[in-house]
Image: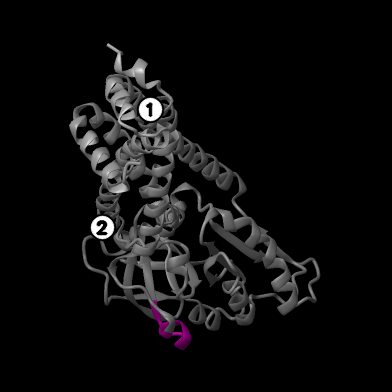
Amino acid sequence: MIGLNDILHISVRQVFRQRRRSLGVLFAVALGTSSLITMLTLGDQLKRDMNRDLDLLGGATVIVAGFTTSTDTTAPPQTFLPKTVEQIRALPGVETASVATDHVDWNVLFWKGESLATPVLGVDEHYWHTSSMNAIKGRLFGAEEVANGERVCVLGEELAKNLYGQDDPIGQYLPIRTEVFRIIGVVGGLQVGDRKKFALLPITTVVRRSDGLMRADRLLVRCRTWDDVLPVGAAMPGIVAQTQGAKFLQIEVARKQLERVVSMVWWIQLFVTISIVATLTVGGFGIWNGMMSSVISRTREIGLKKAMGAEQRDILAQFLCEALTLSLSAAAIGILMAFAVVQAAGLYLEAKPPVGLFFFNAAISFAFSALLGVGTGFYPAQRASRMDAVAAIRYE
């Protein structure tokens, strides 16, 4: 019986000798392995990033809740209580939730001799993240300004341009109703939409100064992924009913946009999966074809080994080991390629994929490559092991 060390030595030597024939197989399996690890490792990160930017596709992961106008004039106006909002934020699948005023107050500014109708909206400190808004100038007000009801405001990009032109509005004062508010930031970009024309104030400031006309009666809930939207939307009425009553609660989910996004992503994932499977299939067929060619070209060698006392299991183990060496070598190259791709993608996405997740996926891919090598190399190895020694020696 041939020793394991001898089988490994012979297998590595044979793979190296046939490197020109094996180059395409190595590349196919390495590419498939690399793609599989990259997709598994970055899949969650890409999904989170895409969900974060879904405002561009209609805000599919944002749920909007509010209270409809009651026909009962004696019923007091409803607002979202802090404990209700906190319980909704604690729901699985909720990334953040923001309270805002449902009613938009149109304030007429007499600015530089002209009348300018300005929509004013009260929002809390979570509104920026919920709506994917970032400051292009200055900063956005936070929890402290909201808690203290400070007279600060953030302008939409278009409103700031209409009011101040090319001048810097940061630090300027804007008259709203009978008071003035200090401008601390400007928001802009594609995700802002019509809010480019808005003046955004702390919700506490707006509610206290509106004489009851504006209330915290609008709740925006951003879900982590599109898979969480429907479960969160279904759970919200129960929470509102338990904490304050949900008689006039209305929840809006962008179902059409959500279905469109899910369908689009499903087709993309299907295409990527098919590409990976096709690549690995080509690699597996390459291993099978290479091993069959190796068996045919080494028929006399097999006959001589059998004549010298090699058993069927020795020949089977040798050729299986060669197929396994080829597939695992390709897997090792694929893992190195995947590591480089994941690191580069992490820098581009400004994220750091978990190292443990990468190595877990690498281990899965390595095991899959081993199965691929054994599965595709078994028939050629079995064929070689069952050859008749005399017929093999006489083979031309």
Extreme front residue here? 308
Residue 190 locus on image (x, y percent): 37, 52
Query: Does residue 41 appear in the picture of this structure?
Result: no
Image-based side of 115 in relation to 163, left or right: right
In-front residue for pair 141/295: 295
CB-based contact (under 8 Å), mark 2 and mark 1 = no
Q: Which residue is mark 1?
A: 288
Query: In the rendered image, which quarter is residue 188 located in?
Result: bottom left
The total of numbered circles placed on residues is 2
In percent of the image, x 55 and y 45: which residue is there?
257
Crowding at dot 2, Cα within 10 Å, few <14 / some 14-19 / many 20+, comes out as few
Q: SS class of the residue under badge 2?
A: helix
The answer to whether residue 258 is above or below residue 136 is: above
Image-based side of 389 in relation to 130, left or right: left
In percent of the image, x 69 and y 61: which residue is there?
234
The answer to whether residue 217 is above or below residue 379 is: below
Quadrant of the frame with the N terminus: top left
Q: Which mark is residue 347?
A: 2
In percent of the image, x 20 and y 32: which residue is there?
19
Image-based side of 214 in relation to 238, left or right: left
Q: Write the start and end of the magenta stretch as one range.
A: 144-152
Q: Mark 1: which amino acid?
A: Trp
Residue 131 locus on image (x, y percent): 46, 62
Identify the coloring: one colour
In-front residue for pair 394/175: 394
Q: Mark 2: which amino acid?
A: Leu
Whichever of labels 2 and 1 marks the residue nearer the N terminus, that label is 1
In percent of the image, x 45 and y 80: which residue is there?
178
Quadrant of the frame with the C terminus: top left
Residue 82 locus on image (x, y percent): 60, 81
Residue 150 colored magenta?
Answer: yes
